[in-house]
């Protein structure tokens, strides 16, 4: 069993910042990557960013300038710092865990998701 627990979502004004956190627990020793996806209503879930246990990061190109993914391997945690938020960033944000090998990420588990709403 793998548990991913997200926190930090909420309502923020346009131009504001928000930091999401995710803690992983359970049978996670075989995984070496964590990340974030998001889903806008009516659309498919889409990649935000990945980070490996060695610190490699990969971002959705459109978000890299404003979002930063970090991790704390000792805590089995991943974070997403989101800056200069716009209403278009409104979505459910999902923490994910998986593996990275030879340039490919393999997603295996999803968190429950946390709502981020950007509105004045």
Image (spheres, rainbow, N blue to C red):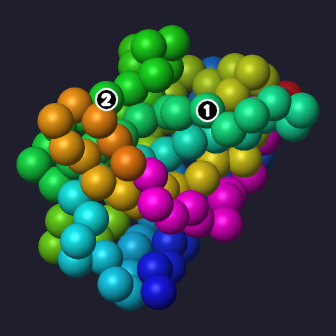
97 is higher (above) or lower (below) than 28: above
- Quarter the C terminus occupies: top right
Compared across the picture, whether 40 is left or right of 101 comes to: right
Mark identifier at residue 115: none
Does the stretch in magenta take in 116? yes
Most frequent secondary structure within the magenta stretch: strand
Residue position for label 2: 58
* Residue occupying image coordinates x 56% and y 42%: 37
| Quadrant position of residue 24 | bottom left
Q: Position of residue 103 (x, y in %)?
A: 22, 31
Residue bounds of the magenta highlight: 107-118
**Residue 75 visible in rendering:** no
Q: How crowded is mark 1: few (under 14 residues within 10 Å), some or many (20 or more)?
A: some
In the picture provided, is 58 more to the left or to the right than 22? left
Instruction: Give the number of callouts.
Output: 2
Mark yes or no: residue 18 visible: yes
Which image quarter: residue 17? top right
Q: Is residue 75 above or below residue 83?
A: below
Residue 63 belongs to the span the image colors magenta: no
Q: Which of 56 and 20 is in front in this view?
A: 56
In this view of the protein, which residue sits in the foreground, 81 or 60? 60
Q: How far apart are marks 2 and 1 (CA)?
A: 13 Å
Residue at the disc numbered 1: 46
Q: Which residue is drawn at 62% across and 25% down?
A: 85
Instruction: Choose top left, top right, bottom left or bottom right for residue 66.
Output: top left
Mark 2 or mark 1: which comes first in sequence?
1
Disc 2 is placed on an element classified as: strand
User: Which percent across, then down, holds residue 19?
Assistant: 49, 48
């Amino acid at each position: 069993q793998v548990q991913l627990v997200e926190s930090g979502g909420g309502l923020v004004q346009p131009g504001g910042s928000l930091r999401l956190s995710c803690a992983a627990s359970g049978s996670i020793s075989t995984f070496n990557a964590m990340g974030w996806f998001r889903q806008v209503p009516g659309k498919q879930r889409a990649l935000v960013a990945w980070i490996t246990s060695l610190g490699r990061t990969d971002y959705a190109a459109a978000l890299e300038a404003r979002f930063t993914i970090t991790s704390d391997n000792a805590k089995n945690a991943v974070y997403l710092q989101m800056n200069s938020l716009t209403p278009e960033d409104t979505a459910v944000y999902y923490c994910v865990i998986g593996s990275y090998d030879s340039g490919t990420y393999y997603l295996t588990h999803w968190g429950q998701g946390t709502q981020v709403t950007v509105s004045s």
